[in-house]
């Protein structure tokens, strides 16, 4: 399993496999295995790497934590990020690119996806062509809920403009077989990005723009877990959303 927390920490600090390897006196291949295969380095090496990255060593490699009595943490929690801005867009792209059965997106706008990855529509078309069911719900710019969110975030009409821009981005997909596009006027407590049995959940905090709010990466492991809670939430919003005609 890839170490997404380590990947994000390296990306945030501009570290490459080679530069971190040099700073910790290991081979670049070792760093690559830490990131892509989830390997855990020796404690002394891990401490050195964590110090260079400015991260808690146990946050990067939980296997190094000494056993102790602690409150339970859901086994579905893969990673927790302080804010969405910490995640490179490649994390979202890789998640959706790996989907084989379902992609769900529930947001107000999330225009960062198209701005940072102009091929995002092409990616969704490709997944749909391979049999993946794609559902996208963006905010209704004319709804009172969206206007209220703008006032709370102190962006005024900015969020309404972003919702309209998001609809312009996704609009060409409205007639693509396998892709459904709707608008919603619900009060979102989280933005959801689902691909099969994995999801990125971007929390919403009052008065804070979504890019500054935490994100947790979930992987479904059993019925009734955290993943299912958010999946059911998506379904509930989807039932109230209005289809966008092509």
Image (spheres, rainbow, N blue to C red):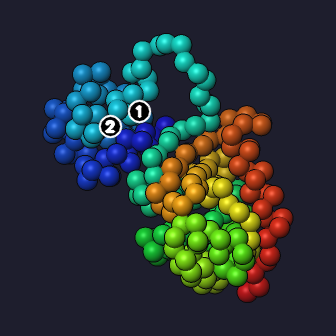
In the figure, residue 107 lies in which quadrant?
bottom right
Classed neighbour count for the residue bearing mark 2: other residues with Cα under 10 Å, few (<14), some (14–19), many (≥20): some
Image disc number at residue 179: none
- Residue depicted at x 73% and y 86%: 246
Secondary structure beneath label 1: helix
Of all residues, the one furthest to the bottom in this rendering is 246
Horizontal side of residue 168 vs 19, given as left or right: right
Above or below: residue 82 compared with residue 156? above
Residue assigned mark 2: 55
Seen from the viewer's position, the closer of residues 226 and 2 is: 226
Above or below: residue 99 compared with residue 60? below
Above or below: residue 140 compared with residue 82? below
Spot occupied by residue 86 in the image (x, y as percentages of width and height):
40, 53
Residue assigned mark 1: 59
- Residue depicted at x 25% and y 53%: 14
Above or below: residue 118 compared with residue 52? below
Horizontal side of residue 65 vs 110, given as left or right: left
Spot occupied by residue 218 in the image (x, y as percentages of width and height):
60, 43
Query: Do the numbered discs 1 and 2 sit on residues whose CB atoms are within 8 Å?
Result: yes
- Residue depicted at x 54% and y 66%: 153
Secondary structure beneath label 2: loop
Horizontal side of residue 39 vs 105, given as left or right: left
In the figure, residue 243 lies in which quadrant?
bottom right
Classed neighbour count for the residue bearing mark 1: other residues with Cα under 10 Å, few (<14), some (14–19), many (≥20): some
Spot occupied by residue 3 in the image (x, y as percentages of width and height):
43, 39
Q: CA distance from mark 1 to mark 2?
A: 7 Å
Spot occupied by residue 238 in the image (x, y as percentages of width and height):
78, 64
Of all residues, the one furthest to the top in this rendering is 68
- Residue depicted at x 47% and y 60%: 211
């Amino acid at each position: 399993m890839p170490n997404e927390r380590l990947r994000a920490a390296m990306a945030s600090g501009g570290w490459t496999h080679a530069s971190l390897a040099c700073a910790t006196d290991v081979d670049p291949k070792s760093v690559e295995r830490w990131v892509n295969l989830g390997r855990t380095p020796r404690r002394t090496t891990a401490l050195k790497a964590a110090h260079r990255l400015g991260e808690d060593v146990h946050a990067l490699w939980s296997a190094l934590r000494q056993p102790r009595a602690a409150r339970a943490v859901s086994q579905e929690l893969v990673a927790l990020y302080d804010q969405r801005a910490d995640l490179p867009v490649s994390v979202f792209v890789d998640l959706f690119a790996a989907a084989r059965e379902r992609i769900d997106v529930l947001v107000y706008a999330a225009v960062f996806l198209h701005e940072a990855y102009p091929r995002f529509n092409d990616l969704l078309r490709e997944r749909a062509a391979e049999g993946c069911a794609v559902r996208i719900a963006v905010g209704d710019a004319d709804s009172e809920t969206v206007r209220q969110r703008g006032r709370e975030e102190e962006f005024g009409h900015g969020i309404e403009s972003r919702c309209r821009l998001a609809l312009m981005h996704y609009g060409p997909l409205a007639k693509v077989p396998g892709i459904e596009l709707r608008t919603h006027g619900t009060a979102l407590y989280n933005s959801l990005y689902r691909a099969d049995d994995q999801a990125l959940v971007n929390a919403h905090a009052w008065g804070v723009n979504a890019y500054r709010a935490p994100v947790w990466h979930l992987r479904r492991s059993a019925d009734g877990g955290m993943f299912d809670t958010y999946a059911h939430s998506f379904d509930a919003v989807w039932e109230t959303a209005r289809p966008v005609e092509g």
